[in-house]
Image (cartoon, grey):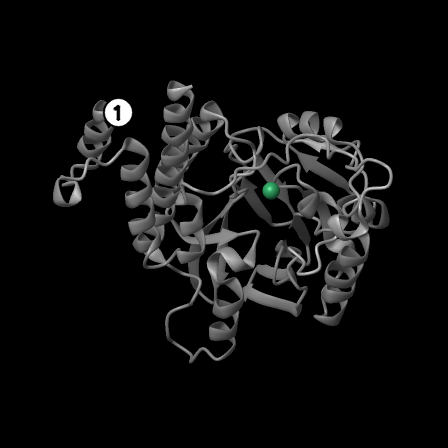
Amino acid sequence: MKKSFLAAAFTLGVTLQPAQGQDLTAAQMHARLGTEAAQDQYSGYASLCDLEAHIRNVNVPRLRKPAGANQSERRPKNGNRPQRIDIPATQVFDNLWFLGTASVTAWLYGSEDGYVLIDGLTTDAEAQKYVIEGMQAAGLSPSAITAILVSHGHGDHYGGADYLAKTLGVDILMSQEDWDLVATLGEHPRFGPPPVDGGTVADGEILRFGSSEMSIHLTPGHTPGTISPIFKVYDGDRQHAAMLWGGTGFNFGPDVEIFQTYAASAQKMRRVAQDSGVDVFLSGHPRRDGTVERMSQLASRVDGTAHPFVRGEGGYALFDVLEHCALAQAERFLAQSAKQ
Ligand SMILES: [Zn+2]
C-alpha cells in the first residue's frame, strides 16, 4: 500500500500529506487525485472515483428474469432510465455535428463528400429520428454517410447501428475485440440484438472517407476494444484536433486487472493526444461533460470569442481523472481481495 502511495506521488512529482496524521490508503489517495483533477472542467466524471460505488458488469449477457418476476421490479417506478430530451442536430464545428439526445450522442464527422457516423444511438427509432431525420432537417444528406464507427460494444451505442447500416447500405465498423464481445451478449430488451457483421478497425489505423480522415486508437477498459478516435475539426480558419474518449463508465465488474488496463489506456491516450495536439475533448454521453451546456454557449457565441468546446491544455486533466479513478478502484478491490 505505502509503496504504491509513494510511487504514484513520485510519478506526479508532488508531495501529498495525509490530512492530520490520517493514513490514506492507496485507493483513497488515487481517488483524491482523480477528484481534484475533475474539479475544474470534468465534474461529471468525479463519480468514477467513488470508492463506495457498486460496480456492475454489463459486458456479460443480460440475465433473464425468472418467469413470474414482479413487474414493478422489472421497471423501477422512479426510473433509472434518464429522461430523453429532444435536441436538434447541432453543428459544433464546421465538420462535426451532434446528433442525439441528452443521454447519448452520435457524432457526425466529415462533410457532404463523405461522413463517418460515430455510434448508432440506442434504438432503431432513435437512429431514424435523430440521424436520418435530424440530418435532413439540418440540410445534410444521410446518404453521404460512408460508415458507422461503433466506439464500443454496448447497446446504447450499437442499438440503432444495424438499422442505419441497412438503410444506408454501409458497414458497421468496430474493433475485433468488441465484435467478439457483442457476439456473446445476446438480445437486449431495450437495445435489441447486437450487430452481427461489418468491418474491423485496428489501433493506429487511419480511416479515410471523402476529404476527411480520422485516426483510430484502442483504449481497452470500458470494453476490451473501446475505440477513441482523433480527428481534425475546423472553426472557420482555425484548426483544432478533437478526441472522443470512447467509453467511460466503470461497468465491467470489480476486476482489478481491467481497472489497471483502463488506467494504462488513459496514460497511453494522454501521450497520443499530446502528440496530435488535441485541444477538444468529446464524450459520447452529453451529461458527463456538459456537451449540451456548451452547445448552448456556442449558439450565443459572439464572433471572435473562444469556441466553448476548445479546452486547450486544461483539457488534459481528463486523463488524470480517468487514470486516478481507475487506479483508485483497482486498489480498492486489490485491498478487498487481500483481506479475504
Ligand atoms: Zn458503454
Tell me if residue 315 comes above or below residue 185 in the rendering: below
Seen in the image, is 110 located left or right of residue 288? right
Tell me if residue 136 comes above or below residue 8 in the rendering: below
Question: What's the residue at 44%, 45% (across, down)?
Answer: 48
Question: What's the residue at 65%, 30% (across, down)?
Answer: 178
State ligand 1's quadrant.
top right
| Residue 237 image offset from top left, x and y in percent | 44, 65
Question: What's the residue at 81%, 38% (across, down)?
Answer: 193
Tell me if residue 77 comes above or below residue 67 in the rendering: below
- Residue 29 sits in quarter: top left
Residue to which mark 1 is pinned: 1
Residue type for callout 1: Met
Seen in the image, is 98 located left or right of residue 184? left
Q: Look at the numbered disc 1 and give the secondary structure of its residue.
A: loop
Seen in the image, is 306 located left or right of residue 138? left
Classify the position of the C terminus by image quarter.
top left
- Residue 182 sits in quarter: top right
- Residue 216 sits in quarter: top right
Could you tell me how many numbered marks the image carries? 1
| Residue 78 image offset from top left, x and y in percent | 66, 61
| Residue 11 image offset from top left, x and y in percent | 21, 32
| Residue 152 image offset from top left, x and y in percent | 62, 38
Classify 10 Å Cα crowding around label 1: few (below 14), some (14-19), many (20 and above): few
Camera-side residue: 2 or 225? 2
Question: What's the residue at 38%, 19% (across, down)?
Answer: 338
Classify the position of the N terminus by image quarter.
top left
Label 1 beta carbon less than 8 Å to ligand 1: no
Camera-side residue: 188 or 208? 188
